[in-house]
Amino acid sequence: MPTPLDKIKPQVRAIRAYTLAPLEAPVKINQNENPFEMPEEIKRAVLARLEDRPWSRYPTFTPTALQEKLAAHANWRADGVLAGNGSNELIQALLTVTVGAGTRVLIPEPTFTLYRQLVSVLGGEVIPVPLTEALQFNIPKLAGKVAMTKADLLILCSPNNPTGCTISERDLRLLLRQSEGLVVVDQAYVEFGGEDFAPLLPEFPNLVILRTFSKAMAMAGLRVGYLLAAPEIALEINKAKLPYNLNFFSIAAAEAALEKVHLLRPLIDRIVAERERLFAELQRIPGLSPVRSEANFFVVHTRIAPGELFEALHARGILIRDVSSYPMLAGYVRLSVGAPEENDRLIEALREIFDGYRDENQY
């Protein structure tokens, strides 16, 4: 007998929801968050804006002031900027207006799994392009697939989550010139490394850039992202955004952060310095092989099974991400860069775990 469940798209029922186990730990380095709190000066500026704001009224329908500040920050035109409830909302809006049955979407993998999930839900076809064995973008293979498939979209994450690799401007230009469709570059982690591709927007109307305040800008809890594109493309994507998608608290916080971004840059520099220190320390632990990253995280190959290592660290109050189910990442975990004391605790725990494993297994 037919059931209500039969009305759900088969492609939706065939996939698993994007989810994260609701676990907590004193050292939480599983979500690529900024380990440093928003500077107090910015917090006070946000709260001052909210003090006299009537909470019973809707936020501004179009956050024009925020879009203008984002445009100035990115050196792009305000009519080519969209603000969203995190960059994830803007990814969803972009794919909603572009993907349907028969749409072909090229996605280098492993990468952020939300891309594949949303394309599948919308009925599109994902054409995966594996990274190289060294977990870098395979530009010759990507260029070949762009030419051969005439794909409607190409989605690149640079720095890539979870591998931390980046694409160069030269290689991106090659793909932009060859592509007949949109080339979407998710730059959620660009403040930590990689090239700024916003200067390419005037030259390439098929380029779309996504960014977020959740990582370097220390605002993961407030959910603000933004999109940069040709104005005519932004206009169409805007049709898929929900009305009043940004609450006035998040708008005020994003504006204040942009006005005082100089206070955030030293924190970003500290994270980059800790990334380099952590990478060097991980290399010294027998049984671990970290992959060089331009983001605020690493993937690390481990001789201990990833699930076993996850449990061993969680038992010591440290939460990491097991990414061994991703394509090409069997045997890998992902470690976000924490504050110095968190990284020290992680290094000490890993040395203890792998020393014990070496004694037991004599590898």
Image: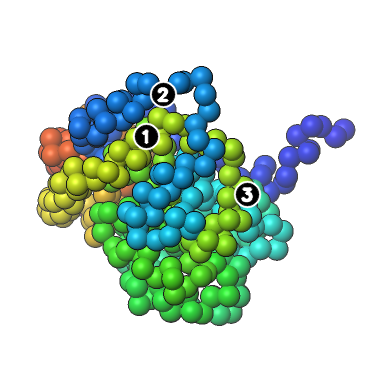
Q: Which residue is mark 2?
A: 53
Query: In which image quadrant can residue 159 be found?
Result: bottom left
Residue at image position (33%, 71%) is 168
| Front one among 93 and 282 | 93
Q: Nearer the viewer, mark 1 or mark 2?
A: 2
Disc 3 residue crowd, few under 14, some 14–19, many 20+, Cα 10 Å: few
Q: Classify residue 180 by image quadrant.
A: bottom right
**Is residue 135 something one can see in this rendering?**
no
Residue type at tag 3: Lys
Residue at position x 59%, y 40% from top?
Answer: 242
Asked if residue 173 can be seen in this view, the reply is yes
Q: Position of residue 54 (x, y in %)?
A: 45, 21
For marks 2 and 3, give the CA distance.
28 Å
Q: Is residue 76 left or right of residue 164?
A: right
Q: Which residue is mark 3?
A: 239
Find out whether the residues at labels 3 and 1 contact each other: C-beta distance under 8 Å. no
Q: Please, is residue 262 above or below residue 36 in the view?
A: below
Judged from the image, the secondary structure of the residue bearing numbered disc 2 is loop
Q: Give the spatial CA distance, label 3 vs label 1.
A: 24 Å
Percent x, y for residue 199?
36, 68
Q: Which numbered dot is residue 76?
A: none
Single out the mark in the foreground, 2 or 3. 2
At mark 1, the secondary structure is helix
Q: Amino acid at mark 1?
A: Ala
| Residue topped by disc 1 | 252
Callouts 1 and 2 close, C-beta under 8 Å: yes
* Residue located at (30% from left, 38% from top): 256
Give the residue furthest to the right: 1
Image location of residue 227, percent across then percent down:
46, 53
Quadrant for the N terminus in the image: top right
